[in-house]
Image (cartoon, grey):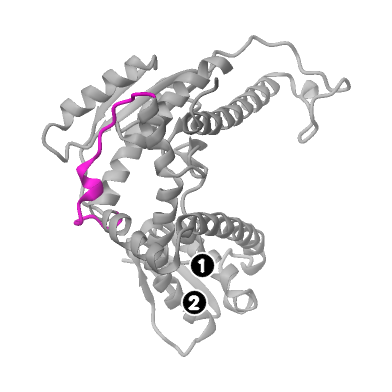
Amino acid sequence: MGPHPAVAAIRLAVRRVLHDVLTDVQRTDAQRADLRRPEAQRTPEHVPPSPAHPQPPREPAASPLVLVACSGGADSMALASALAFEAPKLGIRAGAVTVDHRLQDGSDLRAAEVVSRLTALGLDPIESVAVDVGRDGGPEAAARDARYAALDAMADRHGAAAILLGHTRDDQAETVLLGLARGSGIRSLSGMAAVSGGPGADRRYRRPFLHIDRQTARKACMVQSLPVWDDPHNTDPAYTRSRLRHEGLPALEKALGKGVVEALARTAQLSRDDADALDHWAAQAEASVRDAAGLLECAKLYALPPAVRRRIVRRAAIDAGAPAGALFARHLEEVDRLITGWRGQGAINLPGKVVAQRQGGRLVIRQGC
């Protein structure tokens, strides 16, 4: 008799991601080995190994390490258990990290308890990392920034190939709705990526559960007798996501019927595909709208579709020092009017003390005084 369907679902999701991680590791190892060879012996770029281009024998690489970020909640405990089960079968080392945000009394004791549970699963290495949560961007954003900084630091210390995160389809739906409320464009509607990066590692973070609902993860913990911790912040109405989870989404389902979460998750994927295509288009078009001195020409920008033009403007603002997280649609709309509705208006102030102004038919975006 096989495992419970909920357990089978989470294990399959993790197994698929681990196969992807192994593929990435093997590709990276092959590229590094190729670079160590004399140039005349290297495999030509984009040409796969073949009898005509044999790869040299090399020492087998050490087993890659994959970490799971675990808060002790149902989603991350289900993920940790699936990683502990699947990783050894693929020759992958499995470790874990739990982050103590120190925002609640007794958080250090809970972190120690999570470490004990992860140790019982056979994960190694395991670290509990205490962080200081700042105030920039509000409590939720500040906690997230501190958490990811701690995860990146552990991955760098141990040379981890990937970090698994327990975000579920429900989390994805909430993220899409939050992006919709901000009115910040299609990229916000694309939600969380299944694969995203950290410093110097553009595929570090993996989210195996984006197609799995929260109840499946909780059921998997229950049938495996895995104790879980329910963070009281998740039900605290002081937090926007908590209100959305317990009031907003249920109201939408009552008004529109079941299936809202699935539809929002689909919207995220479709939006991500569109946003990726537009980003690629903008990257290709950018060189064609700059003059010999590298300045953006307003007439050429005007000829581009708005979605492409605003991406180029956004990238220029970020390159000039505007924080990406503080650069909103309203900022880009104001700068866009310098291109499409020019009436002699003055400079536009952007986050990060960046200034955008039109000078001699050029859009100049730079650090202000």
Task: Please state the horizontal and vertical placement of residue 236, each as a whole percent of the image.
Answer: 20, 51
Please say whether residue 234 is one of the residues in the magenta stretch.
Answer: yes
| Whole-percent x, y for residue 195 in the image | 52, 41
Specify the label residue 313 is tagged with. Answer: 1
Judge whether 25 appears above or below 168 on screen. above
Dividing the picture into quadrants, the one containing residue 297 is: bottom right
Amino acid on which the number 2 mark rests in the picture: Asp
Q: Quadrant of the rendered structure where residue 155 is? A: top left
Q: CA distance from mark 1 to mark 2?
A: 8 Å
Q: Position of residue 105 (x, y in %)?
A: 11, 36
Q: Nearer the viewer, residue 76 or 334?
A: 76
Q: Is residue 68 above or below residue 246?
A: above
The part of the chain drawn in magenta is 224-241
Residue 44 can be seen, yes or no: yes
- The quarter of the rendered structure image containing the C terminus is bottom left
Could you say where residue 258 lies in the image, as x and y percent from the top left? 46, 59
Image position of 34 (left or right of 112):
right
Left or right for 194, reference 225: right
* In front of the other: 244 or 325: 244
Q: Residues within 10 Å of mark 1 (few under 14, many from 20)?
A: many
Compared to 343, does 273 lie above or below? above
Q: Is residue 155 visible?
A: no
Which residue lies at the image location 30% right of the left edge and 20% below the top edge?
Answer: 117
State if disc 2 and disc 1 touch (CB < 8 Å).
Answer: yes
- The local secondary structure at tag 2 comes to helix
Residue 336, labelled with which disc? Answer: 2
Residue 109: name its quadrant.
top left
Q: Looking at this view, is 273 or 121 the one in front?
A: 121
Prevailing secondary structure class for the magenta stretch in the rendered image: loop
Identified at 57% across, 74% down, the residue is 306
